[in-house]
Image (spheres, rainbow, N blue to C red):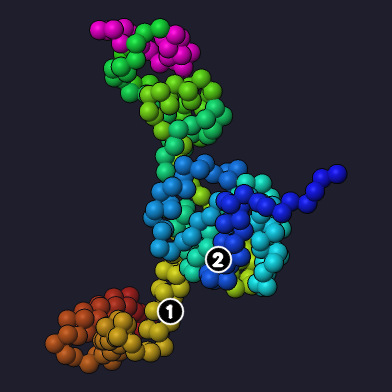
């Protein structure tokens, strides 16, 4: 019969204690699934967000037990999302802002077989420094032209074996790593987040910045147009309102034949046009 465990590894105990404290210390608890992220992506983020975001790699069972003891609103939703290999992020910034910042901090990485190329995969002409041998077959299978010169393999011309959006074959992926060519742009996106009791799913955390920028620009333009039409004066629109009023006053003056230095040319042109119109009609007039 198996006895109940009374001692646990020190690392798990530290993780357990940490996960009991951090959700109380920070306003936001966010989840990232590592199935979609490589561990090498986290290192630069840990350094960049050191003072703003606490990043904890977790074991799902330990995390479930630790979070289940907390009296934190909405924590049950986060526990439901803890499946497989995950990372938890704790911060006081908005989860939407965090997701945007994570999206901006993308890195170029080596492709694995089957990965979709983020850019055109270009292999430049150069001396690879690789000794000839079995590697020649890899170059040939990848469609990269080579020659042997001074005891090393040279790529004779630039080639693009894979276009952006296409899958990188297994053998080419291996070759690209040996040539130090990175073709996958990798970013991190939040899978779920909890902010002061409010739970968010992955789809709810995505913000299209260009779309919102366009919406704000359009709303601003419509607000300016409305304020000008209503003659609601602000520091931003006063020049436009005065210009509109000036144009309106000038139009009234021209219509009324009121001559000023600004309207005299337009008034005379209008009078001349009217006179010519009357003269034209008079020529064709036949008395009854």
Confirm whether the magenta stretch covers residue 138: yes
Asked if residue 206 can be seen in this view, the reply is no
Residue 247: image tag: none
Q: Residue at x 22, y 92 (%)?
A: 258
Q: Residue furthest left?
A: 261
- 185 and 77: which one is in front? 77
Residue 74: image location, x then y, percent: 67, 69
Confirm whether the magenta stretch covers residue 156: no
Region in magenta: 134-152
Relative to 61, is 174 on the left or the right? left
Q: Residue at x 57, y 51 (%)?
A: 11
Residue 147: image location, x then y, percent: 33, 8
Cβ–Cβ under 8 Å for marks 2 and 1? no
Look at the numbered disc 2 and give the secondary structure of its residue. helix
Asked if residue 40 can be seen in this view, the reply is yes
Q: Residue at x 66, y 63 (%)?
A: 67
**Residue receiving disc 1:** 223
Q: CA distance from mark 2 to mark 1?
A: 44 Å
Q: Nearer the viewer, mark 2 or mark 1?
A: 2
- Asked if residue 117 is positioned above or below residue 142 in the image, the reply reads below
**Residue receiving disc 2:** 22
Relative to 16, is 226 on the left or the right? left
């Amino acid at each position: 019969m198996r006895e109940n465990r009374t001692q646990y590894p020190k690392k798990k105990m530290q993780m357990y204690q940490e996960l009991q404290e951090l959700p109380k210390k920070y306003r936001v608890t966010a989840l990232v699934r590592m199935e979609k992220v490589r561990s090498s992506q986290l290192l630069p983020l840990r350094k960049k967000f050191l003072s703003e975001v606490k990043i904890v790699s977790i074991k799902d069972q330990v995390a479930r037990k630790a979070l289940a003891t907390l009296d934190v609103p909405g924590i049950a939703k986060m526990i439901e999302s803890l499946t497989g290999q995950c990372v938890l992020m704790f911060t006081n910034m908005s989860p939407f802002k965090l997701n945007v910042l994570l999206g901006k901090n993308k890195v170029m990485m080596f492709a694995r077989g089957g990965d979709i190329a983020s850019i055109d995969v270009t292999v430049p002409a150069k001396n690879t420094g690789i000794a000839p041998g079995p590697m020649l077959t890899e170059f040939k299978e990848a469609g990269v032209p080579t020659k042997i010169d001074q005891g090393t393999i040279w790529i004779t011309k630039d080639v693009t074996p894979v276009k952006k959006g296409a899958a990188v074959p297994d053998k080419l992926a291996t070759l690209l790593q040996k040539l130090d060519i990175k073709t996958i742009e990798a970013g991190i996106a939040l899978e779920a987040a909890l902010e002061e009791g409010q739970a968010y799913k992955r789809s709810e955390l995505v913000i299209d910045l260009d779309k919102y920028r366009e919406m704000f620009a359009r709303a601003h333009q419509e607000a300016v147009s409305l304020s000008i039409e209503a003659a609601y004066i602000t520091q931003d629109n006063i020049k436009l309102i005065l210009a509109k009023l000036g144009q309106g006053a000038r139009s009234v003056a021209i219509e009324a034949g009121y001559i000023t230095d600004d309207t005299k040319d337009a008034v005379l042109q209008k009078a001349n046009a009217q006179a010519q119109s009357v003269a034209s009609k008079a020529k064709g007039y036949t008395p009854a």
